[in-house]
Image (cartoon, grey):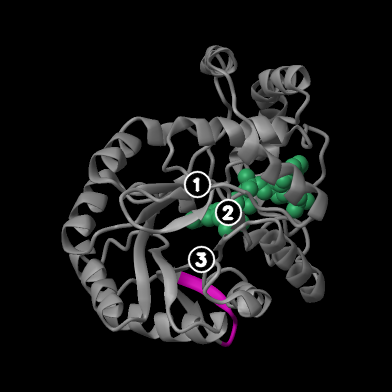
Amino acid sequence: MHKRKLGNSNLEVSALGLGCMGMSMSYGLPMEKPAAIALIRAAVERGVTFFDTAEVYGPFVNEELVGEALAPFRGQVVIATKFGFNIDPGKRLQSGLNSRPEHIRQVAEASLKRLKVDAIDLFYQHRVDPEVPIEDVAGAVKALIAQGKVKHFGLSEPGVQTVRRAHAVQPVTAIQSEYSLWWREPEQELLPALEELGIGFVPFSPLGKGFLTGAIDENTQFVSTDFRNVVPRFNAEARKANLAVVEPLRRIAARRQVTPAQIALAWLLAQKPWIVPIPGTTKLNRLDENNAAADLQLSAADLQEIEQAVSQISLQGERYPEALLKMVGR
Ligand SMILES: NC(=O)c1ccc[n+]([C@@H]2O[C@H](COP(=O)([O-])OP(=O)(O)OC[C@H]3O[C@@H](n4cnc5c(N)ncnc54)[C@H](OP(=O)(O)O)[C@@H]3O)[C@@H](O)[C@H]2O)c1
């Protein structure tokens, strides 16, 4: 797979990374560990060098999984993880934001152990903590970088002013926020600011949590623990209406003899050369399907057709439940 650089940083990664969250939580049942390890290693064999996890995924178990799976490939792959939540160790439950510097330092030490690495390649603040000035957060990560414990700094779902303030203290390598054909808000302010500042962009949920692949419709039943059960954009009525966004992807996919998932990923790659999407999957055949999108060049006519079709659709339902919506864009 060809490589991309995240902004002006020297961090070079495969054009598509692998989101590992869904292997441990959020969608359906968690994978059995041996199968998940085999999947992550298969991704390495196929040229994926960028893996996404977080302390809070599981919590903890996803970092442990990624650490174990990638232990034989240390130095050859880039592992991104995230701090910023309080986690009750007994109940293993997330209980609010915490980006206090002493907490960031503790999380870094624990993540280093779980990931079995000497340095965290890319350490993102998972959500902006309104209780802690971003300068203090950036300062804490800067100190970890000076100690050699972290290599690159990132933020997830920050507002543009927060990015600028953080970047002034410690240059930011990448922002990770939701971006896909059904969530295009980053185009308004965020992407122009990242281009100006030379910061890379890592779209999460690039397949719209699976919706843009065409594998989901209003009749799809999710298991009771599936996060999509509480996402307004995934209630049955919204799904029915939102299938309109899949229709042009299916049409262009049929013409190009590819799949809607591949069109959705190729569209993201076509937006900017410093964008690196991180689709998630628990299945080897889908890993191969998604990876093949890195070689799919959409023509100007394809892109125009997508733009024209999608801009006319009014998508139904918020992308997060209310409590989680409050945490983004700050
Ligand atoms: N920073 C943050 O706050 C944040 C938030 C969410 C996610 N993330 C990161 O971003 C990564 C990706 O996002 P995501 O997992 O939310 O969403 P996504 O990549 O848009 O979609 C994942 C879903 O799509 C399905 N899927 C994948 N490839 C498919 C294909 N070719 N055909 C049909 N279905 C397919 C997967 O199911 P199967 O497993 O059955 O294939 C899974 O349910 C995560 O793993 C995580 O690392 C970060």
Name the secondary structure under disc 1.
loop
Residue 93 painted magenta: yes
Instruction: Give the Cα distance between marks 2 and 3.
Output: 9 Å
Q: Position of residue 98 (x, y in %)?
A: 36, 72
- Crowding at label 1, few (<14), some or many (≥20) Cα neighbours within 10 Å? many
- Read off the residue under disc 2: 17
- Crowding at label 3, few (<14), some or many (≥20) Cα neighbours within 10 Å? many
Residue type, numbered disc 2: Gly
Q: Are marks 2 and 3 in contact (CB under 8 Å)?
A: no
- Crowding at label 2, few (<14), some or many (≥20) Cα neighbours within 10 Å? many
Which residue is pictured at 55% across the width and 84% down the height? 116
User: Is residue 250 depicted above or below 133 in this figure?
Assistant: above
Which residue is pictured at 52% across the width and 36% down the height? 269
Q: Are marks 1 and 2 in contact (CB under 8 Å)?
A: yes
User: Is residue 77 depicted above or below 306 in this figure?
Assistant: below
Which residue is pictured at 30% across the width and 47% down the height? 159
- Read off the residue under disc 1: 276
Name the secondary structure under disc 3.
strand
Tell me which segment is drawn in magenta.
Answer: 90-95
